[in-house]
Image (spheres, grey):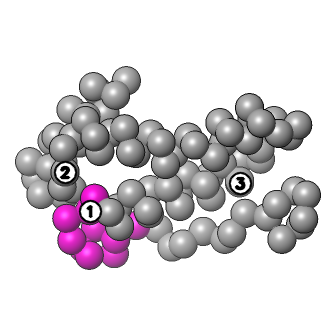
Amino acid sequence: MLTTLASTFQSLADRKVIRGDPLLVAHHFVALLLWIPVNKAMFTETHDSTSDELESHAALAVRAFLIEYGSSSRVLAKSPEQPRRMKSRTTGR
């Protein structure tokens, strides 16, 4: 999976859409995307996430990724609006 993603990122780098080593960029993208949901599933009693929570998390992960690896502000201008913040199920905030 990482090599396929790295290949895609190489294509984007060739077009000057993103910058950085494609394999390292792929590792970072996957980490941003999966870190919180996987840790939530492994280390809490709450294994369920709503589709809205996952969608919000994914959008924020992509936004953080583009801030670091996007080659210009042009990339961020095309990203979706910042999603609403996810509420904690324990605190409600």
- Give the residue at x 63% y 46%: 36
Q: Quadrant of the N terminus?
A: top left
Observer-nearest of 56 and 67: 67
- What is the total number of numbered labels drawn onto the structure image? 3
Question: In the rendered image, which residue does mark 2 sit on?
Answer: 20
Q: Is residue 25 visible?
A: yes
Is residue 26 covered in magenta?
no
Could you tell which of marks 1 and 3 lies nearer the N-terminus?
3
Question: In the rendered image, which residue does mark 3 sit on?
Answer: 52
Can you tell which mark lies on residue 7? none
Identify the secondary structure beneath mark 2.
loop
Could you tell which of marks 1 and 2 lies nearer the N-terminus?
2
x and y, in percent, of residue 51 in the image = 71, 47
- Which amino acid lies under the numbered mark 1 shown in the image of this protein? Gly
x and y, in percent, of residue 38 in the image = 65, 36
Question: In the rendered image, which residue does mark 1 sit on?
Answer: 70
Label 3 to label 2: alpha-carbon separation: 31 Å
Observer-nearest of 43 and 92: 43
Could you tell which of marks 3 and 2 lies nearer the N-terminus?
2
- Which amino acid lies under the numbered mark 3 shown in the image of this protein? Asp
x and y, in percent, of residue 34 in the image = 56, 40
Residue 33 to residue 75: above or below: above
Question: Given the current orientation, which residue lies at the most extreme front position?
Answer: 43
Label 1 to label 2: alpha-carbon separation: 9 Å
Indicate which label's residue lies in the foreground, 1 or 2: 2
**Relative to residue 89, is residue 53 drawn left or right?**
left
* Span colored in magenta: 69-79
- Give the residue at x 51% y 73%: 81
Q: Residues within 10 Å of mark 1 (few under 14, many from 20)?
A: many
Q: Residues within 10 Å of mark 3 (few under 14, many from 20)?
A: few
